[in-house]
Every structure is written in structure tokens, then in C-alpha cells.
Amino acid sequence: MPAITNKQQLLTASLDRLRKRFPLPAVPADTGRTVLEELIYAACREGTTAADADRAYAALKAAFVDWNEVRVSTVPEVAEVLRPLPHPGGRAKRIIALLQAVFEERYSFDLGDVVKKGLKDTARKLRFYKDGVDDYAVAWVVQRTLHGHAVPLDGPTVRVLRRLGVVEPAVADDPQVPEAVRGSVEHLIPKARDAEFTELFSEHARELCVEGVPHCPLCPLKADCPTGHEVLAKKPADPKPKPKPR
């Protein structure tokens, strides 16, 4: 059985071990992106790693003159630029919908004023662009732009949390899970480590805690992971006996 059962201690120990396994660069205090650009970046970042999102976002900015050109482009055109990110069509649709909603409201692409009235009010205003903004994107802006305490949860991150026993399987299968459990997860992670958590768990989900059968023998969290114990306890199937010669 896992040695650590307290969820907060489990996540703290997991972060320490993953930091040794994935020596990532420190998260910059300022990305230099505007609020709108951070929302677009979040659409690239959700469900993947920072390295892949950085490449896709850079390709997006290089392929189009400005955000208005992205807005008036077709979903397939934008999706082609976002490859090889998973589900590029869905990401492209989200980005175009966001740009269209912002343009129709403001006739510009400036969202700078929405961050001037506190975290809760900013989150509420960002949710107004519901076709282009989900809970992950809102939490991303709160964490990276406003430097508030927020933990963006995407599918791969929830998969790791479920396997660790931090999130119940029934909850993890709920399509509303990011919004439903984000608050409880934020209570388990100190603000000073929320960005580190986001990056390390994304890398872990990509490299080891993959969809399907995870690579538990190589996992630094296996000692305290219920799923790791189950996977490693399974004995390989006996090979089929060779037919005896007649």
C-alpha cells in the first residue's frame, strides 16, 4: 500500500520527486503576453506541454499578420498551423470564437481593462467569452497574468490526480471536472508552487503517466501511487506452452 495517504503531503512529495525527474526551467514571472494573448496561449497549452504550446503559439503568430487575420480565417486554416497539437480543430475553433466575441464587443483586441477590478471580477468577465474561454483558460490567466492562486486542470493532469488517488474516479469522468475539483486541489497546493505543479504534472502525464497503460516501472511516484501498486503487482501472463512434437 502507498506510504503517504494524506493528499497534501502526497502532492508535496510528488512535486519534489517530479522536479528531480523533470528539471524544467523556472516559470517566468512575466510572459510579456497581453490578457487576450494569454487566453489564446491557454487554448494552445491545455492538454499538452509548455514546449509544444510554445511552438504552436509561435507558429500561429508567424503565420498570420495579426489577430484580426486569425479571426477571419477558417477553422481548417488555423488548425493546420496548430498541428501537431492534439485536437487542433477544436483549439482553432476556440481561438476564432474568442477573437470574434472580443471584436464584436470592443471593435479591438484589448482586454487590459478586465484585470483592474480584482481576481473574482476578472474571472467573471473572462467567462463571458464562453465559446472561446473555459475554466482552464480562466485559471491560467489568474495564475500567470494576475499572479493569483489558481491551478488550471486539463485532462492529462486530472488523469494523474485520479491515479494518485487525489481525485475520485467518478469525479474524474465528469466532463465538468476541472471546474468541480479545481478549488479542492488549490487547497492542497501552496500558491508558491501552483505554476510548478502545472508544468511538472503536464510533463509527467506526457512522458510517464500516459493514457492507457502508464509507465509505472519508470515512475518516481510509484511508491505512493495506488495505480502504480496495482500495475506493478500484476504478474505478466504465462507464455503459451509450445506444442509437443509428435
Image (spheres, rainbow, N blue to C red):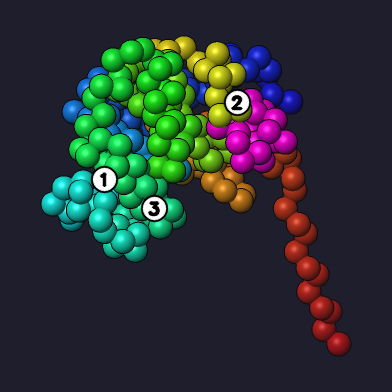
Residue 142 appears in the picture as rendered: yes
Q: Nearer the viewer, mark 2 or mark 3?
A: 3
- Mark before the other along the chain sequence, 3 or 1: 1
Residue 172 lies in the magenta stretch: yes
Q: Amino acid at mark 1?
A: Tyr
> What percent of the width, then of the height, locates residue 153?
50, 32
Callout 3 secondary element: helix
Disc 3 and disc 1 in contact, CB within 8 angstroms: no
Residue holding disc 1: 57
Q: Residue at x 69, y 24 (%)?
A: 2
> What percent of the width, then of the height, locates residue 192?
39, 12
Disc 1 and disc 2 in contact, CB within 8 angstroms: no
Quarter of the image with the C terminus is bottom right
Q: Residue at x 82, y 84 (%)?
A: 245
- Mark before the other along the chain sequence, 2 or 3: 3
Outermost residue toward the bottom in this view: 246
Is residue 201 or residue 220 the one in the foreground? 201
Q: Nearer the viewer, mark 3 or mark 1?
A: 3
Residue holding disc 3: 93
Is residue 32 or residue 51 the one in the foreground? 32
